[in-house]
Structures are given as C-alpha cells and as structure tokens.
Amino acid sequence: MPSPGPGDFASFFHAHRDAIHRLLHRLTRNAADADDLLQETFLTAWKKRGQFDGRGSAEGWLRRTAFRLYLNQRTKSKRRTSLADARSLAKDGSVPAGEHAVDDREATSFLLSRIAEALDDLPDEPREAFVLFRFEGMTCAQIAETTGVPAKTVETRLRRATELLAQSVAKYRDHLPGSPGR
Amino acid sequence: MSDRTPFDDIRDLAEGTLDAAAAAQIRARIESDPALRADFDAYAAVHAFTAPAVAPVAASSLTFERIDAARRAARVRRMRPWLAAAASLLVVAAGAFAWHHHMPRTVVLRSIPLDVAAAAIDDAAPIGDVVPALLADWRPTRDGAVNWIPSIEEGREVARATNRPMFLWIYHPECPYCIEWDRKAFRDPEVCAAAAEFVPVRVDVMKAPPGLEKYLGDDMMANWPYLGVMSADEKERVDFPGMKGTAAIRDHLAKALATQAKLGAAVSWDIAAGMARADAARAADDVAAEFRELAAVRDAEMGGAMKTSAAKRIDAIAANASAALLDAKSLAATDEEAGARRLSEAAERFRGTPYGLDLAVVEQELRATGRFPVLETAAK
C-alpha cells in the first residue's frame, strides 16, 4: 500500500483502476454502477489505508473492499441490470424461427442476451462466484479471499451455478460455437 | 501446498490452457471419479455456453482528477461539522468579547469607603495640634542619663501632649551640686527610670526667661537648686528643692508619681513619637508615611486619646481618597482620559496606602474598558 500523499494516491489509482473496474463491471453488469463503486472503492481504501496490514497484495485488499461495497449496494437495491452493455444489443429475447435465420453477428448478440438472462436467473451467491471464476479467471481460493467465505463454500456455489446454467445450455445448444447447426 | 481445488483444474482443462501432461493427469482423475466427471461435464457445457460473454469489458470512464476532487469534497464534508462548531465558537467568543468590553465591570474597593461623611475630613486633627515635633525622636533618657528638655515652654507642650507631669530642674552650670547631680544622681539607673515617667526639663537660671521666681521663691538660696514635679497647667505641683543625694531624689520622684495618678493615663513615648512622625510626614505631604505611623498608633495596645486621634486621621485620609475617586468618576463621565489622569494622580499620591491600590485598580479598569467601573465596597 503506498504511503500517504496525493501523488501516491494517483499512482495507486492508476495501478489498480482497470482490474477493480473489470471486477465491479462483471458483478454489477452496468458501466455506470461499476464506475460509482470504483470511485467509492478507492475513496474508502485510501481513507482506510492505515488498516492495510501488508499481508497479501494491495490488489487483493482492494478487491475485498470493492466486493463489500458491491454487496452493500446489492443489499440496498435488488435491481438487476444487463450483463455489460452487450445486452442492449438484443432487441428481441425470443428464439429465432429458423436455426439458420440469423447470421453470426445476430447469433452472438442473441447468445449474449441468453447468457445474461441465465446469469440473472441465478441466486446471488452462486452467480457472483461463477462470474468471478469464469469471467475474472479467479481461483476458488482467490474468490474465497475476496468474498470472505471458505473455499469449499465457493466450490459449492460454483457447482450450484453450473448445474443451473447447464439447464439453460440445453435450450440454446444449436447456437453454441461449434454446434452441429453452425 | 497448493490451494487449487478440483474446480480450478476443471476450468483449466475446459479452457485448454494446460500442458499435455497436466491435462492427462486431470483427465485421469476425472475418469476415475464419477462426481468429478459430472462436475466437469456440466461445467464444460456451461463454459462453452458463456464463451461469448468473456469479451473484455469497456474501460472505466473514471479519471484520477474526478476521484481526487471527490476525495477533497469528502474531506470538506467531514470537516464541515467541525467548521460549523468552530464558527459557532467564534460567534460566542465574539459576543462574549463585545459584552465584556461594553458592559462596565465591577471593582470591589478593598479600603476606600464610598459613604464617608464630608465631616470626617474636617475632624482630622491639624498638624502639630497635640504633639510637638520634638517627640518624633526624643526620649526622657539617653546614653544612661536623663535627657533634659532645655525649655519650660517646650517641656510644657510635651507634658500636655503626653499627659505627664514635668520634672523641673533649675540649675547653674557652675553650681557644684548641679555638677555633682549631673555626674551622678541623674545618671543613676533608678533615678533615670523614675525620671522617664515625667517630662524632664532643665533650665539654666541665668538664661531662662523671667518668671522663675515662682519656683525659687523670694529666698532663692533656700530653694537652690530647684527640683520639682508639676502638671502642665501647674495646678498640681510638688517642690523638693535643696541639696540632697541620689537616694533622696529618687524617693521624691517616687512620691511625685502620685501627681501622675491625678492626671490619668499617660501617653507612651512610642505612641507620642509615632504621632509626631505622622505629623512630620503630613507636613512633608508624605501620605504613605503618615498612614503608616497613624496605623501603628491606632493599632497599639495602649494609646488613649492618641489612638482615637490616629483613627480619625486615617479616616480623613480615606475620605480624601474617596473624594479623589468620586472626582475622577465625575470627570470620566464626560472625559475618560481626564478621569483616568485624576485617578493616576490620586493613585500616586496615595501610593503606599491601601487606598492607593484601590485607585490604581479603578484606573486600570477604566483604561482597559473605556468605562468607569461599578464600584462596590468590600464587606467588612
């Protein structure tokens, strides 16, 4: 953790902004919310920088801070927004009439919408564990550290998310990359 | 020890990021564990399904300038209650300051009375009214001998002031008996002690003014040398003239003390000296010295009328200080500086007395606040 001072705060911010923003964006699925939480994360971390005991990485400590703030926000508002801005590309959530009725671009847009829906349908904890695991590439141990739960619990949540998502996969199997219909 | 879990291995296998050996090892584990196999199958399908969503997210629009501004704003917000409290304190302090400087404060006078009757000043005994200046540093004996006053009139004044009889010796410097008495009898400790109860007066028969006949009589030689004790007004008088020894003189003086009894209590030499010094100080316009001498007389255990006189004169000094104070107050009503100057002069005049201190405090208050303070007298 850098020592106090405006210059240090700047370098601290620039060193970790993108990673923390990506994490928050994945969790909130909304660019504006992610930026708000990103600002809050850095302000909180800087204010409480004296509490950082130096164990572990500064980024891990920031991730935990960001995740706690995200949880606070989630508790306050159960509002769901789309997964990234990609969801806005999908104007119609219905399955196309013909399996070859859409070109690749439309198919991708269609799939993103379905993925977003499937993820939205997950309970909060399994969804968060899956997002961090799948999209942030975090290991179970890192997720456990960030979310403050045991690694076994993370595995349980991942298994639950995987089971529920697997049921969605069946509906869109033909649209998956490398499927027989593609 | 690795903190990897089977799920981590499953994902790495699904992503194809493992080298061949590691991938083969994990595949073998999966094949041997049906539960792991189920996890892998489910995850592999979901992994492929969610692949399109792995695309990088848009970069953050948050800049350092924006977050730094927010940080400064938050700091101001945190300080706002303190700033408000500080502002409130400033307002209160300013109010207290204004009140403090615009409300006349009260000065409690320790010594100066505010209700002195004007008559107190007039009642004070005038200089030298009762105590001759001689008494300031004179005693009836000195260096083991009687310390004679060389004038009947002067002796009479001392006698009157101290309420003591005179002890009169009419002598001649060449008279053998006189010379003998001077050498012996009037150096005798007992005679000296007895003589100290009187006002010893010795006059040269050749130099004294007319009127000694009343002591010497028609036959001067029969009453020579003359010794006698008498009150100042000479209504009481005891003669014991003629040649006699020391013991006889001592006896005569002892008997003559009866005259003193008729006059009442004598004034001690110390008190009389104090009053004389007070008079001298007053003549020199030294108020502090006058007050000091008068206070000593007033507070003496014995003093009689002189104690009363000293107390009256102290009252007169206090009344003068009071008059100066009220005069300054009157001046300050229209001219603050004139009032302060009057107080300064009075404080200087009465410096060394308790009244001077009161005056200085009032002057200080007037100069500090620009307002004449409310005056109160300390409870006695």
Image: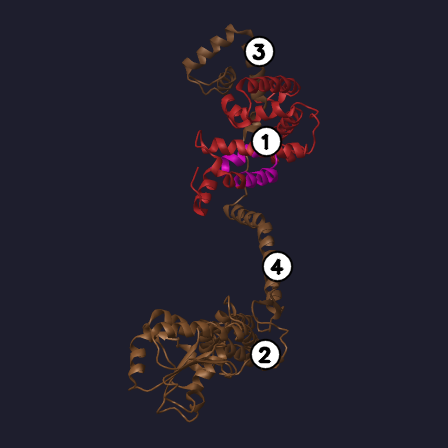
Chain colours: A red, B brown
Residue found at the very far bottom of the displayed protein: B210
Does residue B196 show up?
no
Name the spot of residue A72 as percent of width and height, x first.
62, 33
Viewer-side residue, A101 vs B42:
B42
Disc 3 versus disc 2: nearer the observer: 2
Name the spot of residue B354 as percent of width and height, x first.
51, 70
Q: Amino acid at mark 1?
A: Leu
Left or right: A56 in relation to B82: left
Left or right: B65 in relation to B253: right
Q: Which residue is mark 3?
A: B38
Q: Amino acid at mark 2?
A: Ala
Q: Gap between marks 4 and 2, in whole Å?
A: 40 Å
Left or right: A88 in relation to B155: right
Viewer-side residue, B110 vs B156:
B156
Does residue A77 show up?
yes
SS at circle 4: helix
